[in-house]
Amino acid sequence: MKINYILTIGLIILTISCGKSKKEIEQEKAQIELEQKALAERKEKERIHLEKIEVGKSKLKMELTNELDRLKKMLVQEKNNLNEINKFQLGRLSSTKEKQLTEQNQKINILNDYIRKLEKEISLTSLRETFDFQDTPEGVVNYIFQSAKSKDFSKLRNLCDPYGENDADTRRICLVEMQPTEMQNRFVESFENGRIMGNPKIENETAEIEIAFGQYSDKLEKIKLIKRMDKWYIGSY
């Protein structure tokens, strides 16, 4: 018994002293190399992702700046029109003039308000947030409905494709917070009673969801979404 015990202890010591086999070492080395490769690929993907986001930001800022320039030119023209209305016109009733002045001042006030909101939006183009509801395409679409119901449009700007590859219709959804009240009311009317019809069609990094929308939920449309680094965004509508 004592001899067997000594032999057993000896074998254990011998096994420990010998360490891992060559095959085990090679397997561990291969596993480490795979993990390092996966990490490098992930970092490269993130680098490209961030670069494309910066391109998207620049594209959006340029589009908004062009729109701002257009609105400022319109404002100058409307102010010139106001000056013309203020001038004496033979045969015009004072009540007519007052009505024209009121209407023209309303136009100018709307433009000024729109310009102010647009300038704020331009200042926010460098910021970007993501949210838990973007983990699924359904979450994004349902948030659009929720935003219309609550009339809280503050997060919508983050739902468009960060690479700037979305279409004009989705851009209007994302930028509804800066839109005139009339446009915001249209958005609310279109989506506050919206609902998803059936299951989304998901293929790789894209998804398509059919929705019922409109005041009476009697209109059908398909929203296409794109996945960017594990988050979903609206691409076309």
Image: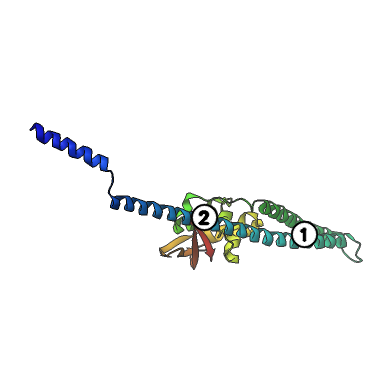
- Res 106 seen here: yes
Q: Is residue 89 left or right of residue 6?
A: right
How far across and how far down the image is residue 125, in percent? Answer: 64, 54
Q: CA distance from mark 1 to mark 2?
A: 39 Å
Q: Amino acid at mark 1?
A: Lys
Determine the image quadrant of residue 105. bottom right
Asked whether residue 230 is in view, the answer is: no
* Total number of numbered discs in the rendering: 2
Answer with mark 1 or mark 2, whichever residue precedes in sequence.
2
- Judging depth in this view, the residue of 210 and 224 nearest the camera is 224
Disc assigned to residue 147: none
The one of 38 and 185 positioned closer to us in this rendering: 38
Where in the figure is residue 161, as x and y percent of width and height? 55, 60
* Frontmost residue, 144 versus 208: 208
Element type at mark 1: helix
Query: Against 225, is 151 above or below?
Result: above
Q: Residue at image x 50%, y 62%?
A: 226
- SS type, badge 2: helix
Residue indicated by mark 1:
72
Q: Residue at x 91, y 62 (%)?
A: 88
Q: Nearer the viewer, mark 1 or mark 2?
A: 2
Residue 83's spot in the image, x, y percent? 87, 60
Report which residue position mark 2 lands on: 46
Mark 2 residue type: Glu
Residue shown at 77%/57% (left/top)? 108
Name the spot of residue 3 as percent of width and height, x first.
10, 34
Q: Identify whether 28 is placed above or below 68.
A: above
